Amino acid sequence: ARDFGATISLFGDEWVTGFGEGFHSFVLSCPAESAQDLEAEWRAEKIPYAKLGKVNKSGELKVGDQSIPVAELRQAWVREDFWE
């Protein structure tokens, strides 16, 4: 949204944890000032989590040494023929 981007660092099985379609997996972004409260709540409830990266204003999604403009991702997502 809003042409933001993100830098993501993944290690080991975090690809599956963060982006797999398994049960109870999701990606959340929040303001930095809310992160400590969320993490404290998750620890208290024994909910496993992993920090994957940070949102930024670059307009690109960067994972490891690869990068793609968010506009290209959005275009692929809205293309009707993409889903056929």
Image: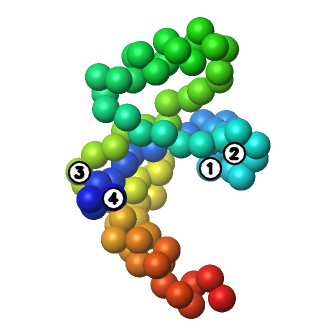
Q: Which residue, given by chain and number where applicable, does mark 1 sit on?
A: 19
Q: Do the numbered discs 2 and 1 sit on residues whose CB atoms are within 8 Å? A: yes
Q: CA distance from mark 2 to mark 1?
A: 5 Å
Q: Tell me which label, 4 or 3, sits earlier in the chain.
A: 4
Q: Which residue, given by chain and number where applicable, does mark 3 sit on?
A: 57
SS for dot 2: helix
In what quadrant of the picture does the N terminus appear?
bottom left
**Rendered location of residue 28, percent (x, y):** 48, 39
Q: Do the numbered discs 2 and 4 sit on residues whose CB atoms are within 8 Å? A: no
SS for dot 3: loop
Q: Which residue, given by chain and number where applicable, does mark 2 sit on?
A: 16
The three-letter amino acid code for the residue at tag 2 is: Val
Q: CA distance from mark 4 to mark 3?
A: 11 Å
Colouring scheme applied when the structure was drawn: rainbow
Q: Do the numbered discs 4 and 3 sit on residues whose CB atoms are within 8 Å? A: no
Q: Which residue, given by chain and number where applicable, does mark 4 sit on?
A: 1
Which mark is nearer the camera, 2 or 4? 4
Q: CA distance from mark 2 to mark 4?
A: 23 Å
Q: Do the numbered discs 3 and 2 sit on residues whose CB atoms are within 8 Å? A: no
Q: Do the numbered discs 1 and 4 sit on residues whose CB atoms are within 8 Å? A: no
Which mark is nearer the camera, 4 or 3? 4
| Mark number, residue 31 | none
20 vs 31: above or below = below
In what quadrant of the picture does the C terminus appear?
bottom right
Foreground residue, 61 or 29?
29
Which mark is nearer the camera, 1 or 4? 4
